[in-house]
Amino acid sequence: MAKDNSKKRKWTRRAFIITGGLAGTGLVVGVAGNLYMNKAVKKYSGIGMGEGSSLNAWIRIAPDNTVTLAVPRAEMGQGIYTALPMLIAEELEIDMNSIEVIHPQPDKPYTNTFLVTQKEPNAFKGYTMMEKVYTFIGIVGTGGSTSVPDGFNNMRYAGATAREMLKKAAADKWGVAVAECRAEKGYIINAKNERLSYGELAEAASSIKIKDLPELKKKEDWTIIQKPIQRVDIPEKVTGDAEFGLDVRLKDMLYAAVRHPATIGGKITGINNQIDIEGMRGVKKVVLTDFGAAVIADNTWRAKNAALALDLAEDDGGNTGISSASIAQQLTDILAAKPLATPEDEGDVNTALSGSGKVIEARYDVPYLAHATMEPMNCTVQIEEGKAAVWVGHQAPFVVQNAVNEISGIDQSAILVHTTYLGGGFGRRAEPDFVKAATAIAQSMPGTPIQTVFTREEDMRNDMYRPAVASQFKAAVNEKGEIEAWDNMIALQSVSNSSMSRVMPSMAVKPKDDIATTEGAMHLPYHMNNRRVAFGQLDLPIQVGYWRSVGSSQNGFFTECFMDECAEAAGKDPYEFRRSKLDKHPRFKAVLDKAAEMSNWKTPLPENKFRGIALHKSFGSIVAEVAEITKLGDKEFSIDNYYCAIDCGQYVNPNTIEAQMQGGIVFGLSAALYGEITWNNGQVEQYNFPQYDMVRMNVSPTVAVHIMEVDEYPGGVGEPGTPPAAPALVNALAAATGVRERSLPLAKQGYRFV
């Protein structure tokens, strides 16, 4: 294998796995005993760690007192390289500045069971059957805003167990009772104020077994959790030392650029000018794979230009008839047809709609959306003598191993995954396509590391898009302002069926069972006397996938805008109308009240200023947002302020939560204002950011964030800021213009934002 010359942290990922459990090099510890939480693997030592005293793969304490923490969740800007170490450091009694963070191999203890079970880990009830199954499979991934919910208890117990092992080792050395020892800032101190560093105790501690789970610190004793901590990845990113996938540089590395079929579902059948292209300067090889044609060259620029010059023979797969117009018609037909499923049906909606209440109807639409990560898809692969090494920013390293194994046939135990920083994920970097393409290309030149890149144009035109969705509403509101009936029919492609068919086909749900389709549309907190939510499936060869906040990203827009329409029909203030229906949900009401308070909702605004409000729960967190805008012209506005209140239960790093709310709002506004992928003749019409714009600094609002103090199990924060962003703005626009916009993006409706 080629030598890795890229910039590294003090400990490489491979070194952590290989040397972590060897005698004399330090302590590797997680939690011992049969009781340990949802990732219990008895005396697990990690692949390549050898026999001996290592217990687990989360914590390594070296003789020089360096504490290395394995964080098996991808750092894609959400601050997880800081949040999970904070949980460990709190119980281990170490300073955050003494920690080295690495991303380990995708081994079974690192399974994200919360991602697949959506259940709070319970240390004292042990290891559930489903958790055992998922851990056996080894679903090691980052997504669904689950990293903190998955690790909140687990990582604290990991730190606490290590602390108790170190205390026992020190007590044995001094010949005193463990109760006479305390842990403090990387040292064990006894009653005489004698001290031993963790590094001095690490080797002895590694042989100590802790049978029972230690007691965790009480919330009032926390010194790190819930304190604002600077993210550990920020200095590297400021200095340029951070390694993203595109930064990887290896000895004798080559570069590849890919051309996909022009038509969705098509196939490249041949290359008409291969000899000519291979004669171009810097070009090493032209290859045709099942994933497209590729040019391998001595730099990315030459590979890209040569790939653009390829003369390709293609089979369009019979999909040239796909267009945005035809898709819109199919969605309309589905709304009028019998539902595929009706997962929520309470009361008698039909009778209530035919009663004496005022009936309102509306249809909402959103288009396909690309992920448009700032760092285009890329993956570096080297294959040699039955082994593979991969350098990639990916949300799920187990998917990387599976993809490389599928294409190359190399055993997963011989596939090493180096997970770099991710230049944006949003669900796109959980997909296997770019890894499979890179593997197939690397196979053509064994022994040579090849970095495969999808150019921005190839990336945008070959994404796994958020689906186009149509949502039809019908509601009855009585003279008291009560919602007598709420009827919602949705039409779209199933995201979970499409994505999981690529990622893990054996676990792909049928469209009728896809809970992502109605998340954010079902189980709304508002009191309604009768309610029904149904949906139908759109079948197309267009690949759709998980996009930041998934079903809530569109259903939050639909439901919160239609709630405003119900409020208008009842002649009620939008905030008061919502509030009147939340008596059985005090956490929702408290968040709504806080956002209203932050925005001075009850205080009249100056002339030409308007507000809109939205409330939504996703990924275990409740978020309310108020958008404040200024009308500058007929359809010209400035977006001045967003006021955001979030209840995410017990939180870890308030700095991260504030940043995620700000980023989530801007992400949602980009989609609401500009985002749209359109189709013509079976092809995507957008190529790059000039056709797929984003919110710039001059348009971006000032965002104020308040974190509610709630003593409940943590929810996620990476995605919940996005769903309320669009409806808060659209509701403000309706207040300003008297016109209800029901189709996004707003720029397509003639709006201009400055």
Image: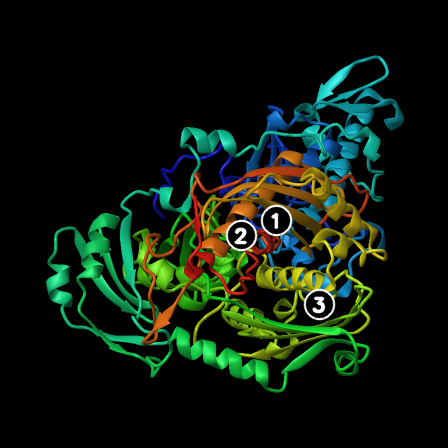
Mark 2 and mark 1 in contact? Answer it, CB < 8 Å.
yes
Q: Is residue 244 above or below residue 64?
A: below
Query: Local crowd at mark 2 within 10 Å, few (<14), some, or many (≥20)?
Result: many
Residue 522 image-quadrant placement: bottom right
Q: Amino acid at mark 2?
A: Gly
Give the colouring mode of the picture: rainbow
Q: Is label 2 in a helix, a strand or a loop? A: helix
**Tag 1 or tag 2, which sits nearer the N-term?**
2
Residue at coordinates 36% horizontally, 59% vertically from top-left? 459
Q: CA distance from mark 3 to mark 1?
A: 19 Å
- The image shows residue 227, relative to residue 657, as above or below, that is above
Label 1: state its secondary structure.
loop
> Within 10 angstroms of label 3, few (less than 14), some, or many (20 or more) residues?
some
Q: Which mark is residue 522?
A: 3
Reading the image, the residue beneath label 2 is 668
Relative image position of residue 525 (x, y in whole percent): 77, 60
Q: In this figure, which residue is indicated by the disc labeled 1?
A: 721
* Side of 322 where 25 appears, left or right: right
Tell me the SS state at disc 3.
loop
